[in-house]
Image (cartoon, rainbow, N blue to C red):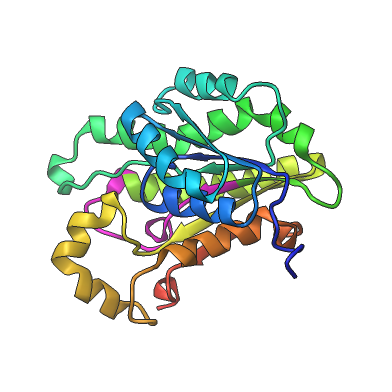
Amino acid sequence: MTDLFSLAGKTALVTGGTRGIGLMIARGLLRAGAAKVVISSRKPEACAKAAAELAESGTVEAIPADLGTEAGCLGLAAGLGDGPLHVLVNNAGATWGAPLAEFPASAWDKVVDLNLKAPFFLTRALLPALRAAATDDDPARVINIGSVDGIMTPADRYSYTASKAGLHQLTRVLAKELGPERITVNAVAPGPFESKMMAATLEAFGEAIAGAVPLRRIGRPDDMAGVAVFLASRAGAYVNGAVIPVDGGLTAL
C-alpha cells in the first residue's frame, strides 16, 4: 500500500500553490514522496515565502506567473524547462460576488480567464512534458480544482459558479481526448476549506456553514492532500474524467 500511494520520482506543478488549497496539495504531494513540486503564484514574495515553508517537506521550486492571460500560461510552461511533468494541478483561481443588477463585465473576464481559460491554455502548453512522463501503468495526471459551487447554485457569484461548472465539463472533455495518450484528467470539487478566498465568509458564517455540512465541519488540510495524492499516485491510475466532491457530503443534500 505504501508503494501504491507513493509519488517517489515524480515532478508536479501546483498553480496557486502558495496558499489555501494549493498549499495543502503541494505539501501533501511532497510528503507522499514527490521528487520535486513546483509552485506558482502571481506575487514573487508569496512564492518565496511558500517555498521556504514547504522546503522542510521536500524539494520545491517557485515560479511567479500571472495565469490570467495565455501569455502568462505559456511563460510558466517555458519556465519549467524540458523535463517530464508527471502531475499538473490547475488550482489558481479567483472569485467575485455582487448582486445581479450590479455584477460587472470585468468580473466575468477576470474570473473566467483565470478559472477556466488558464487550465485549458496551461494544460495544452504542457502536453509535451506530460506525454514524456506518461506510461501505460502510470499515466501522467492533470488535476483541475473545481468547486461545489460548480455543482450547486450559490447566489451572487455568477462568473465563479459558471467557470467552475465549465471546468468540470472541460475536465470530462479532456479526459476523453487525452486518455489515449496516457494522460488522465480529473477534477476535485472542494466544499468549505480554510483559505484566503473563504476567510471572510468563514469568519462571519463559519458555524452555520459547518452546520450545513453532513459531517458538521469544514475541510482540513489532510482532506485535500489525501484526494490529491490518491489521484496523483498509482492508486488513482484508472480514474479518468471524474469530478470528485470533497465536501463532507454537502452536494449530497
Q: How many marks?
A: 0
Quarter where residue 24 is shown: bottom left
Q: Is residue 148 magenta?
A: yes
As rendered, which of 78 and 74 lies closer to the eye?
78
Q: Quadrant of the N terminus?
A: bottom right
Whether residue 241 can be seen here = no
Quarter where residue 103 is shown: top left
For image coordinates 36% across by 51% down, the residue present is 20
As rendered, which of 242 and 92 lies closer to the eye?
92
Please tell me whether residue 163 is drawn above or below residue 186 in the rendered image: above
- Residue 152: % across, % down: 38, 63
Judged left or right of residue 181, residue 223 is left
Judged left or right of residue 76, residue 134 is right
Whether residue 130 can be seen here = yes
Quarter where residue 64 is shown: top left
As rendered, which of 225 and 57 lies closer to the eye?
57
Please tell me whether residue 206 is drawn above or below residue 53 in the rendered image: below
Judged left or right of residue 76, residue 154 is left
State the residue lying farthest toward the front: 56
Judged left or right of residue 79, residue 189 is left
State the residue lying farthest toward the right: 136
For image coordinates 43% across by 60% down, the residue present is 190
- Residue 65: % across, % down: 43, 25
Please tell me whether residue 21 is drawn above or below residue 39 in the rendered image: below
For image coordinates 25% across by 72% down, the residue present is 209
Q: Quadrant of the C terminus?
A: bottom left
Q: Is residue 188 magenta?
A: no
- Residue 72: % across, % down: 45, 21
- Residues in magenta, as a range: 143-159
- Residue 212: % across, % down: 29, 78
